[in-house]
Amino acid sequence: MKTPQSLVAPPVRTGAEQLPNGRILGWAEWGPANGMPVLFSPGAATSRHLGFGAEAVHDLGVRLISLDRPGLGASTPAPGRTLQDFAEDTRILIERKGLDRPPAMVGNSQGAPFALACAAARTVDALALVSAADEIAEPRFSDVLPRELQQLADLCVRVPEEAANFFAGFTPRTMWDMVMGNSPACDLAVYQREPFAGAYWKALEEGFAQGAADGYARDAVLVMGRWGLDLAAIGIPVDVWYGAEDSSHSPDQGAGLAARIPGAVRHIVPGTGGAVLWTAADQILRTLLGRSGEPPR
């Protein structure tokens, strides 16, 4: 039985790297410094502060490295950035940290498409997509999305500047209320208890510390629009994880997304929703390590 303390903990190491163009890329780490590196692209509007698997990373010998996307947390903005630009930032970070081989990666929620960009660029060697935000601007979803969401996705494609202005009005409180108001009881039992609640709120405050325009708003437009990624060309192992009670991240719980990625394996975890990253962290990391050819310790 997992205790609340086993789900999240403060980072044990934090820092930042200066990229060749002068921008700063913030990061945070959990687990042993000499452990097997696993990169982490966190969810919507959250900074590097909110990790997962606080006990699992130690049990499995994982060095979890979370990255702040541009404009969130400690990372400086990158106006006009794309999903592919994040893959290049990640490649540079891997070099700067002296990792001797492409690491595995986890992408959660809104961070999943950014992780997919890393997979498409072969920046990483195995990928776990967890509660992945789907490409809802795809025509196949046009008849199943709620009307307001469909209109917003259309706006992200047709007039991205107008969509960005809408998302720029979001705050930590807006995001908190949206998540708490749209999550099933099984997830609220995780989200509203300490230490998760405090860690999540801190990650939101850091995520919006520079305002929303260059961080969350840009992320949202990129993720809710067309991705421009050739998923059929991805040649690394990919696992797609959803909680059975999750009705907010993908209209078909990733069935179509997994089908677009050669060899992807889809997992539906009972008794949880969007909180599956935290409630099934051990299972997710064990599977990922096996895919990357590094058996858990």
Image (tube, helix red, strand yellow):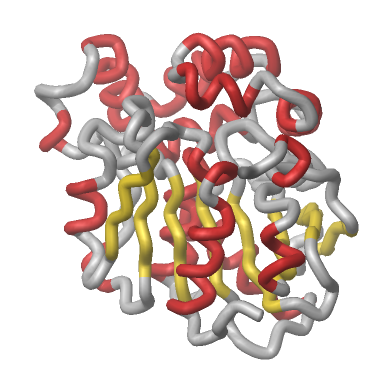
Q: Is residue 277 above or below residue 143?
A: below
Q: Quadrant of residue 61?
A: bottom right
Find residue 68 and report its horizontal and vertical position in percent. Answer: 71, 48
**Frontmost residue, 284 versus 271:** 271
Q: Quadrant of residue 132?
A: top left
Quadrant where the C terminus is found in the figure: bottom right
Would residue 77 be seen by someone viewing this image from the given angle? no
Q: Quadrant of residue 72?
A: top right
Q: Residue furthest bottom?
A: 100
Would you say 272 lies left or right of 265 here? right
Q: Residue furthest front?
A: 1
Find residue 236 and report its horizontal and vertical position in percent. Answer: 37, 77
**Frontmost residue, 56 versus 292:** 56
Question: At 55% from the left edge and 14% from the top edge, which residue is drawn?
Answer: 180
Find residue 254 and report its horizontal and vertical position in percent. Answer: 27, 45
Question: At 65% from the left edge and 43% from the top edge, which residue is drawn?
Answer: 2
Would you say 10 lies left or right of 257 here? right
Q: Is residue 23 above or below residue 226?
A: below
Q: Is residue 166 above or below residue 11?
A: above
Find residue 64 and report its horizontal and vertical position in percent. Answer: 71, 63
Question: At 39% from the left edge and 39% from the top edge, which residue is drawn?
Answer: 243
Q: How many marks?
A: 0
